[in-house]
Image (cartoon, rainbow, N blue to C red):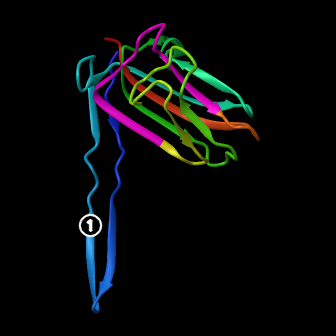
């Protein structure tokens, strides 16, 4: 099995302002793509998980990074290092999703503390990557919580790139 990954997460722009009858332009160049080779060391990954999920109103789920999620080939993923995460809340959602803050066995990952979380409103997207990766500890630090607020069901797409060693 082989996996090559490109993470595209950049802001670019063309900022123009008229000053004294002249147009002043500030081009904001995009950041280079983040590339991961196939493998398990720094700058490499060998696990890919992607899914479209829906949560009912006022419910949550824990994405178990070492034991229950299956990849597109039906293989249960067993991440040791998470290299990239993308979570995109559906545009049609009317509630917010909270990512992180599992009550127990929480995946700390890029957060400062396992109780930390981010909130995604409708059509919000969270993308983060790490060449070395964030440690996953099976049984004690492997649950990435996704919670939906009260009011309506909410959909989201999740993508996780990881290494098995």
Q: Decide which of 55, 104 is in the foreground and name it.
A: 104
In the image, farthest residue toward the left: 42
Q: Decide which of 44, 61 is in the foreground and name it.
A: 61
Query: For the point 26% across and 67% down, which residue is it?
Result: 27
The residue labelled by disc 1 is: 27
| Picture quadrant of residue 53 | top right
Quarter in which the N terminus is drawn: top left
Stretch of the chain drawn in magenta: 126-147
**Percent of width and height locating residue 46:** 34, 18
Query: For the point 42% across and 39% down, which residue is it?
Result: 127
**Relative to 130, residue 163 above or below:** above
Query: For the point 50% across and 19% down, which residue is it?
Result: 106
In the image, farthest residue toward the top: 139
**Percent of width and height locating residue 104:** 55, 15
Is 48 placed left or right of 4 in the picture? right
Is 34 placed left or right of 52 in the picture? left
**Relative to 55, residue 89 above or below:** below
Q: Is residue 141 magenta?
A: yes
Q: Main secondary structure of the magenta part?
A: strand
The secondary structure type at the circle numbered 1 is strand
**Relative to 6, residue 10 above or below:** below
**Percent of width and height locating residue 142:** 47, 15
Quarter in which the C terminus is drawn: top left
**Relative to 84, residue 29 above or below:** below
Query: For the point 73% across and 32% down, which residue is it?
Result: 58
- Tag 1: Cα neighbours inside 10 Å, few (<14), some, or many (≥20)? few
In the image, farthest residue toward the bottom: 21
């Amino acid at each position: 099995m082989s996996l090559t990954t490109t993470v595209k997460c950049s802001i670019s722009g063309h900022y123009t302002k008229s000053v004294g009858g002249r147009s002043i332009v500030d081009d904001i160049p995009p950041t280079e793509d983040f590339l991961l080779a196939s493998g398990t060391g720094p700058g490499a990954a060998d696990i890919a998980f992607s899914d479209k999920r829906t949560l009912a109103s006022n419910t949550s789920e824990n994405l178990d990074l070492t034991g229950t999620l299956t990849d597109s080939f039906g293989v249960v993923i067993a991440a040791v290092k998470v290299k990239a995460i993308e979570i995109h809340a559906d545009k049609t959602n009317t509630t917010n999703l909270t990512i992180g803050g599992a009550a127990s066995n929480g995946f700390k990952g890029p957060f400062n503390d396992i109780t930390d979380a981010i909130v995604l409103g409708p059509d919000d997207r969270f993308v983060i990557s790490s060449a070395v990766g964030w440690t996953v500890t099976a049984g004690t630090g492997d649950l990435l919580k996704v919670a939906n607020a009260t009011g309506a069901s909410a959909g989201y797409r999740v993508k996780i790139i990881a290494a098995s060693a």
